[in-house]
Image (cartoon, rainbow, N blue to C red):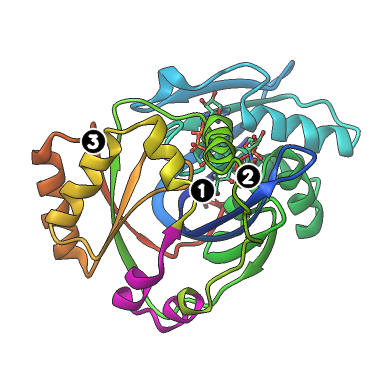
Amino acid sequence: MSVTVRVPAKVNVQLAVGAARPDGFHDLANVFLAVGLYDEVTATASPGGPRVTCTGPDAAQVPLDGTNLAARAAVALARRHGLSPDVHLHIAKDIPVAGGMAGGSADGAAALVACDALWGTRASRDELLDICAELGSDVPFSLVGGAALGTGRGERLSPLEVGGTFHWVFAMAHRGLSTPAVFREFDRLGEGVAIPEPVASQDLIDALAKGDPDLLAASVSNDLEPAALALFPDLAAALAAGRAAGALAALVSGSGPTTAFLVRDESAAARTARALQDSATCRTVRTASGPVPGATVLA
Ligand SMILES: C[C@](O)(CO)[C@H](O)COP(=O)(O)OP(=O)(O)OC[C@H]1O[C@@H](n2ccc(N)nc2=O)[C@H](O)[C@@H]1O
Ligand SMILES: Nc1ncnc2c1ncn2[C@@H]1O[C@H](COP(=O)(O)OP(=O)(O)OP(=O)(O)O)[C@@H](O)[C@H]1O
């Protein structure tokens, strides 16, 4: 028997970052939007697991050992329920790796939901969310999807209302960026400067609730963007190319290096995607819209 779970990528429409905490993490006001670029994780009973396989354009960059977040999710659930994690996890990966779109986190949430269904552990939503938070700051949002404000290190979620569909173009860079390295660069750039407490923007929350792309474009922000640009200066050219193509807003997605462009509708998405592809400032270009649901078992 097998269970397949589909799980989306995310874009951070606001990422406000506070000073480094004693534990090395940063408090955030992190407004997540789940967008329709998906990985699928299939869990199949198999002795001696977890065994991980992966297919897709970036598969070669995905670790297949016990560090894979899907494997870690299976082990965490099995341990809590006194089971052995006898499972084969196959990841059909379409979310770019190390792109700031929570690809690994998505696989962790998907594997958890898939193993829960496969093993009949019937974990409560709260237990699943607890395990997600242990696995990583972005993992709880991959489980819930939609739109949400993440506080703490991003793992404490409050759902947000969204009054429409937002259309996006994503430009994937020629190489990845390490999330810890980007946070370290944020700290370095902020040395000697008083870093304010991260606060969610009410204008941005209102723009989401209204479903209004112009209002959203006026209020998106990412405090990690200067750090990502410092580590990867070529990203400025991708941002400029998207702006020149008429995007309503251009920003680095999370810790980068994927760049995200908010556009008015599907036809603007197709136009902007073509212009970005022709600009040769990126590796590949994808379009997607959101919000979409979080990790979902496929029938
Ligand atoms: C940049 C974002 O993707 C925005 O959603 C997230 O904040 C990162 O979430 P993630 O990849 O799930 O991160 P984790 O696996 O929890 O942490 C990886 C590393 O990122 C840094 N980190 C992450 C989250 C946070 N609030 N503060 C941090 O400083 C820490 O160096 C940490 O060791
Ligand atoms: N299932 C997985 N898929 C991809 N990468 C994984 C996975 N499990 C662990 N990793 C490791 O995590 C690193 C970060 O990859 P990931 O694709 O999650 O980055 P990201 O999208 O930038 O993350 P985030 O947006 O959550 O900061 C990879 O370089 C890889 O070593």
Marked residue nearer the N-terminal end (1 or 2):
1
Secondary structure of residue under mark 2? helix
Q: Identify the mark at residue 109; answer none if there is no mark.
A: 2
Measured Cα–Cα span from mark 3 to mark 2: 26 Å
Residue highlighted by disc 3: 284
User: In which quarter of the view is residue 115 placed?
Assistant: top right
Magenta stretch: includes residue 164: no
Secondary structure of residue under mark 1? strand
Residue at image x 31%, y 33%? 233
Question: What crowding class fits label 2: few (fewer than 14 Cα within 10 Å), some (14-19), or many (20 or more)?
Answer: many
Marked residue nearer the N-terminal end (3 or 2):
2
Work out whether residue 95 can be spotted.
Answer: no
Work out whether residue 90 can be spotted.
Answer: yes
Measured Cα–Cα span from mark 1 to mark 2: 8 Å
Measured Cα–Cα span from mark 1 to mark 3: 21 Å
Which residue type does callout 3 highlight? Thr
Magenta stretch: includes residue 212: yes
Marked residue nearer the N-terminal end (1 or 3):
1
Magenta segment boundaries in residue numbering: 205-221
